[in-house]
Image (cartoon, helix red, strand yellow):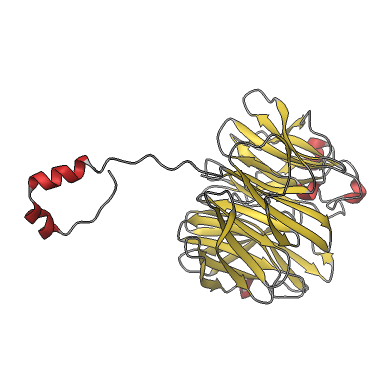
Amino acid sequence: MKNKIYNLATLLLLGTSIIISSCDNDKEEPEAEKAINYAMTVTGGTYPDQTTYFLGTKDLPSGTVGTASAAELASNGMMFSYGGYAYVTTFGAPATLRKYSFDQAAKPTEVASFIVQGLKTFGAVDFISETEAYAASNSYGGVPKLVKFNPTTMQITSTIDLTALQKTGATQIFYLGMTHRDDQIFMGCNYQAGFNNLADSVYVAVIGRTSGKVEKLISDGRTGMIWSSGTASGFSGGSLVLDESGDIYVHGTGNGTGVPSGVIRIKKGATTFDKDYFLNLKTATGADCLGLMYYGNGKALTCRADVADNYPFDGDVPSYKYYRIDLAAKTSQGALAGIPDVFGSSAFISKWDNNIIYINSPGATANSVYSLTIADGSVKKVFDLSSGICNGFTKLN
């Protein structure tokens, strides 16, 4: 029965027969069929002349997907998904986060947005609930910010003071990757001097949600430099992932001078790195790896750099291969067969049930999305893109 609010005195005056009649006529109507069930973003062109296309489909895409019906946004974009809505940010001042839905004509509709002046993009967005979320805004040459906002109204409710995260010798800080557990936000920090990464350690900020203050900055020198900006609601390789038991795994790219790429851990209930846990990705896979894409039960994908000179960037041709890793056993399960080499910076997975994950395959001449059936490890192509690189794909709730 639909929820209705009645004045108690009116109900008493109407009498029992009227109330019963109202109940009989108030049967639940069938929910209107959605025009759109899946959403994606695709970026085409060459920097700085890029366009992000935001589009949706009713059915799971197949064949070749075009962008003729898409909304067009200037510059390179990133998508996040939460609560049946898509949130899109594109590179360029001011940093803007837009909330989208689709109407019954399948047209993308901007519901609301907010901006952070003086910065150019949002490196990470992490959703807690329908009324609480956090967005880290960045750009080179500006002071980055972490804002708390209400996803329903798209109003910024506070700005977190991050003065405590300053580091001697660093001229720039970028906030990359976020997750939450209990009353705390865990956010990756990338420190730079000019255009040089200060990659001596992995740095993670611990921020109290209730207090709205930085509680501590923790570091670990067994690997170095957080680089990826993924979150549980985003579509890029992650740097911080939360497993089912409450442990947080943190990916570092290494520092190029002997310290390898690796995975370290913050155990459930702790706010320090677990000194007894380290997965050396260079040893496990045979090369340094970019990103951590967790899909459950201790398993994840990462992108192994087959051309060391490109790492952690992309070269002119795809040079990264998806590898399966077991975080609990601290081992590699080998290359993921059936998917060609990819550009590592555009790698991501998407998952909305416990059976299948969808894997982005951005290549030199073909850009596709594949599926991996978790139970048997089988891989197949789901759809191709007519042009551009997919940088977000999800099923809307």
Residue 70 percent coordinates (x, y): 68, 52
Left or right of 236? Residue 213 is left
Foreground residue among 52 and 68? 68
Q: Residue at x 77, y 74 (%)?
A: 171
Q: In the picture, which quadrant includes the N terminus?
A: top left
Left or right of 48? Residue 242 is left
Left or right of 249? Residue 221 is right
Q: Residue at x 56, y 49 (%)?
A: 105
Residue 46 percent coordinates (x, y): 85, 57
The answer to whether any part of residue 188 appears in the image is no
Q: Residue furthest front?
A: 105
Q: Residue at x 88, y 41 (%)?
A: 306
Q: Quadrant of residue 123?
A: bottom right
Q: Residue at x 69, y 77 (%)?
A: 118
Left or right of 362? Residue 272 is left
Foreground residue among 119 and 273? 119
The answer to whether any part of residue 108 appears in the image is yes
Foreground residue among 345 and 46? 46
Image height of 176 relative to 262, above or below = below
Residue 234 percent coordinates (x, y): 63, 51
